[in-house]
Each structure stands twice: as C-alpha cells, then as structure tokens.
Image (cartoon, rainbow, N blue to C red):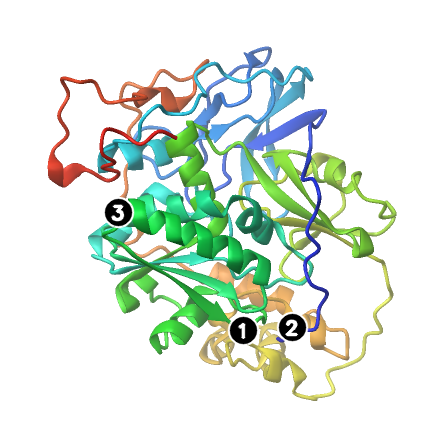
Amino acid sequence: MDFSRRYPQVREILLERINPRRVILPMKMHYGVPCLPTVEVGSRVKAGQCVGMPAPHTFASPVHTGISGTVTAIETIKLPNGIETPAVFIENDMKRAVLESIVPRKTMNLTSHDAVGIIRAAGICGMGGEGIPTAAKISRARNYAVDDLLVNCLQSEPFATSDLMIVNEHSGYVVYGAAAVARACGAKNIKILISHRRKSELKMLEGSVERAARDFPDLNIEIKLFRDRFPQGYYRLVGKALYSVDMGPNDTLEGKCKAVMFNCATMYSCWAALADNMPLMERVVTVCAGADTHNVLAPIGTPVGELIATSTAPTTDKIIWGNCFTGIAIDNPEDTPIIKMTSAVTVVPKTEVPRTPCIHCGLCSETCPMSLSPNIVYEMLVQGLTQKAAEEGGRDCIACGTCSYICPAGIDLANKIALFASAGRVIEENSLLHNTKFDTGKFDIGEVSLLEEYPDEVKPDEKIPKDGLILPFKEGKPV
C-alpha cells in the first residue's frame, strides 16, 4: 500500500525521556522461552541491573530494568499477543540511580566471542519483528556463511517514526553497530535499506558510512533506496526486491539469499552495548495520536497509559498496542507494558464502522502484499475449512492489516487470518531453538549487570588471536 502522500516526519526539537511511576518487565519479550527472575519481592534495583536471566541451555534473552526502585511483585501476566509470562513489577524511587558498572568501554579490541557474548548478555533481540535474540541470529548467519548484512530502516507503518528518529539522531551508532555485527557474522557487505524520500536520514547515514568506511576498510557499505510503501520491510518482500527471489513461508534470507537482516534499532542497541556497556533497557517509541504524534524514550516495561499521557489524546479513544495496522487493541493501558519490540502505541478515535456482508469487490486481494485473496480465506475459516484455507495460502499472511483497513464492508479479515497463520507456524528441527544454547557460565546474577563479565580493555600481556578479532582497532579505539 502506498503511503507516499502521508505527512513527512517532523523533526522533534527534543526527545522526551519518560520516567514512569513503575515498570512491568515480562520475562518473555523475545522468541523463545521465558527468563527466570533474578530478584525477589522487596529487592532494591538500579537501572541497568539484570532482573531476568535465561535458564542454562535455554533459548531466551536477559531482561534488565531501566529504572531504579523496589521490586513490589512477581506475577504471571498475559500480554495482548496472548503470551503468558512471569513479570517483575518495580516501583520507581525517582532517583534514576544507574548501576556503577555501566560506563563506556575504554578500548574496542574485542574478539568475536567477546562481542557476541556482550550482545547476548545485553538482552538484545530483534526490535522490529519477532524478537529473535540477536546473538542467536548472528550464530545462524555465520553457520549459513552469509555475504550480506541488511539494515532495515524501512519503517513504513503510517505515522510511526521511532526508527527514523534513531537514524536521524544516532546514525553513527546504527552504522558502527552494523559493521561490528557484520564482522561477527562473517558478512563482507552491508546494505542499509531506507526510503528514497527520507532526505534528512539519508544525509546523516551518508556521513556515518563515510566515517565507518575508514575504520572498517574490509567492509563494503552501501545505501539502498526503496519506495515509500507499506509493508516494505518484510523479509520476503526485501528478498524479492534485492535478490529477485520468491521466498516461501519456511524460507529464510540466510538460506535463500545468503543475507541476514536486522532492524536499525537493534544495530543501535548493539553498538551501545559494545561501546557504552549499555544493556537493552529502554527504547524509542512513537506515540501516534493524530496531530499530537511524537516520539519518546521510555524504559522497557513502561505502562502504555503513561506514554499516552504525554499526548492530548482523549482517554476514551481506542488504544492500540503497536501500530495502527499491525497492533492489538487493549482495554487496560495502565497494566499493559511496552516490550522490546514495541515501536509505537496508537490512539484511534472510536468510530462505528458499518458492517455488511462481503460485496466481493476484490479490494482486499488488490492490496494484499502476499497476493492472497483474504475474502476467500476468511470465508473458509468461518466455515471451518482450515485445510482449504491453507491451500489458498492462508498460512502466508503477514498480519499487515491492509485487508481489514480497505474492506468497505467493515470485516476484520486480518485478525482471523493472522491468527490462523500464526497457529500454523511450527519450529523446524534445524531452527534456532535447536541450534543455540545459552550458558550462565560464571555470571554473577542479581545485583550486577551481565555485561560485567567482559573486560573494559585488553591487558598488555593478553594476546588476541588474529583470526578472532572482530574490532581490531590499532592500539584500541577510544569510544
């Protein structure tokens, strides 16, 4: 769907930092299994502290708090996407105390093992998609011997600009994070994907690419321009656009195109962990509220209600956990937290949509990016003909929501089809779940950041094998 006529991003003078009264930290904000809480009710915590740790040999991503305060409860909650998970509730003491160990790294001579370990311990996972732990994705890319690393800056959802804000303000971190991860993956080429209409972001990226080229002379870094349309950044559409490859629902970019794709916010977080010793404890979120749409920097776990309070939107309007197309309507914003993958929260004016039977206009088929016939798949699901729905391609639905948006009959096609598609996706024997193990090793969990496992600098008598270097800056690169 073409949103090229939408309003351009308005560059904000100041990115508001949210300091919520409390945070709710789900132990499962990633693809995998829940973490185990490392704190107890009554525990005092500081920002940056690990409060959730993967059990040994499980596929999970650590959880850190973005505020200081007291743990008031550890309870099981249900997220809007249906996931039930333990969650740590922390009351903010408003002191903004940060863990003492979170200081910039003095030098950047790191081995591949060090870099991937830091990224894993920082709790970084895909921040624009399913939340696959980034360390696992790096490992998978290395196993496939990928040639290209793709940085997805194609934030094509209407009104959401959180990724564009990161590119505008922190393009250096995005590009350097991509370069470090490319070396960890063994990729030689970096392709930064962005809309041709994003002039300000392009200018910032070009300057950062020029600087990174001097520090990473072995990497070929280029910017690829795309049309401004939705949903442009989906991996199967990217595979078609860049490599002219038609990908099935079980195909991967790594296997079909020798490429791996990361969201730009993920790359930013990787460099923040490598350079600043900063775990993933906060993120930029777009509060989409009509004319009052703006971005905020919020700790992970901030209740949606506290984000909506930064706008002038009426509290009686419908609130969406996510973007207006792909998000989920919620009834309890005060008890629903943002998670690592939440790039936006949306306020939609309540309107009565007239419902009529399907008029077979074909608009849903015309707008579907996966070339499905949503009205046919929907009708088969209503009649319980799931096998027929699968044969019509129902499992290929990417939950973009365009069919529901365009339907003149007001039928919520996407909701039913997306649930059917999601339920049909199974984990294969060669998937990440079976190829990746996490080991707590000698981590001292509880009152420390997991990043303390890795030294700030290389000792003079410590030699790093030449083939193990990932960031081999001469004499160590000052941050």
Quarter location, residue 238:
bottom left
Question: Whole-percent x and y of residue 116?
Answer: 30, 37
Q: Crowdedness of circle 2 by 10 Å Cα count: few (<14), some, many (20+)?
A: some
For marks 3 and 1 on the same chain, the one whose residue lies earlier in the sequence:
3
Quarter location, residue 3:
bottom right
**162 lies above or below 277:** below
Quarter location, residue 251:
bottom left
Q: Residue 211 carries which label?
A: none
Question: Whole-percent x and y of residue 283?
Answer: 57, 39
State whether residue 433 appears in this view. no
Q: Nearer the viewer, residue 199 or 9?
A: 199
| Residue type at tag 3 | Arg
Residue at x 41% of width, y 39% of height: 270
State whether residue 198 appears in this view. yes
Residue at x 69% of width, y 59% of height: 159
| Circle 3 residue | 183
| Residue type at tag 2 | Ser
Q: In which quarter of the image is the C terminus?
A: top left
For marks 1 and 2 on the same chain, the one whose residue lies earlier in the sequence:
2
Q: How far apart are marks 3 and 2 (CA)?
A: 35 Å
Q: Are marks 3 and 2 in contact (CB under 8 Å)?
A: no
Q: Quadrant of the N terminus?
A: bottom right
Q: Which mark is residue 227?
A: 1
Residue at x 67% of width, y 19% of height: 91
SS type, badge 3: helix
SS type, badge 1: loop
| Circle 2 residue | 4
Q: Do the residues labelled 1 and 2 touch (CB within 8 Å)?
A: yes
Residue at x 68% of width, y 15% of height: 93
Q: In the visual, does 335 lie left or right of 343?
A: right
For marks 3 and 2 on the same chain, the one whose residue lies earlier in the sequence:
2
